[in-house]
Image (cartoon, rainbow, N blue to C red):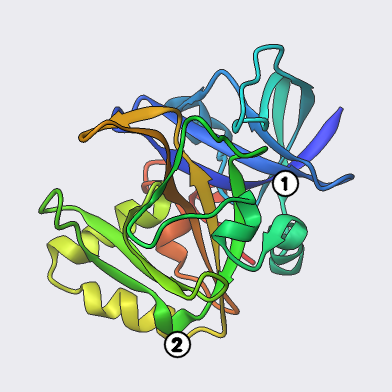
Amino acid sequence: MNRIIVTDLTRFSKPEKVCIAGINIENGECIRPTPYLSSDYCKQLGILPGSILKGIFRKSLTIEKPHSEDTNYQNIVHDGICTAEEFERVLCFNLANGIEEGFNVKIASDQKYIPANSPPEHSIITIKVSPKSIFIVDDKYNPGRIRISFFDVQSNRYFNFVPITDLGFYEYGMTHFNNGSLDLLNNFIKSQERVYLRIGLSRRHEAPNERIGFWIQVNGIYTFPKYLEGIRSYKQDQPEAQQKLIF
């Protein structure tokens, strides 16, 4: 049996399924359980970022780069919640100075994907960014939704209008967006000392203009030393023990 700390709980366009990923506590390996879990199952177990899961995890026999984290699983059980110190430590296990370094690729200044003909070795990294460089903004490509812009120091550029796939953050942010109070969320982020972004790559996708590749997305947005409790919670119809993470 292995134990992982969940670092990514990401959404799909169809809410019936979610994607989770976590870090093996023993060796720092990033694990993405596949097939994907149902949203109902995650709620039933109370799986959130910071949850400790215990189970049998074996590398998938059908791994294709860059999604080397894909892992089959059996007998997953919820085994508690980590501390803030433990969570920040596992976020740093695969910390990179920037996106290009983390995926070992060069990305053009107007590009937010990695071409399919040059896939990196993995699909999830952590980067640390200045809280003041982050902006949660209206999605200019799909009005009525939100995206994130942030400055990547290593590549000396802003990544603008990147999709937010962090399930809890996106739902919380949309509440503020719909209430016209997105500035409150942005101001909170900028008031923090440290922000870590979990940067993920989509499955192979063909976009207009024959752009085929793995698209950059933000799987997790984590602030320290404080966080907004409403981001890491399920709705009030869940048992209180499953509603929130107390760091």
> In terms of depth relative to the viewer, which is nearer, 246 or 237?
246
> Which amino acid type is marked by label 2?
Ser
Horizontal and vertical percent position of residue 33: 63, 27
Res 166 label: none
Horizontal and vertical percent position of residue 81: 69, 52
In the picture shown, does residue 47 fall above or below 138? above
Horizontal and vertical percent position of residue 26: 89, 45
**Left or right side of 173 for 65:** right
> Which amino acid type is marked by label 1?
Gly
> In terms of depth relative to the viewer, which is nearer, 142 or 73?
142
Res 80 label: 1
Horizontal and vertical percent position of residue 46: 55, 40
| Spatial CA span between label 2 and label 1 | 29 Å
Q: Mark 2 vs mark 1: which is more N-terminal?
A: 1
Residue count near mark 2 (Cα–Cα under 10 Å), binned few <14, some 14–19, many ≥20 = few
| Of the two numbered discs 2 and 1 in the rendering, the one whose residue sits closer to the viewer | 2
Query: Judging from the image, what secondary structure is the residue with disc 1 in?
Result: strand
- Identify the residue position indicated by label 2 in the image: 191
Residue plotted at (77% across, 24% down): 57
Residue count near mark 1 (Cα–Cα under 10 Å), binned few <14, some 14–19, many ≥20 = some
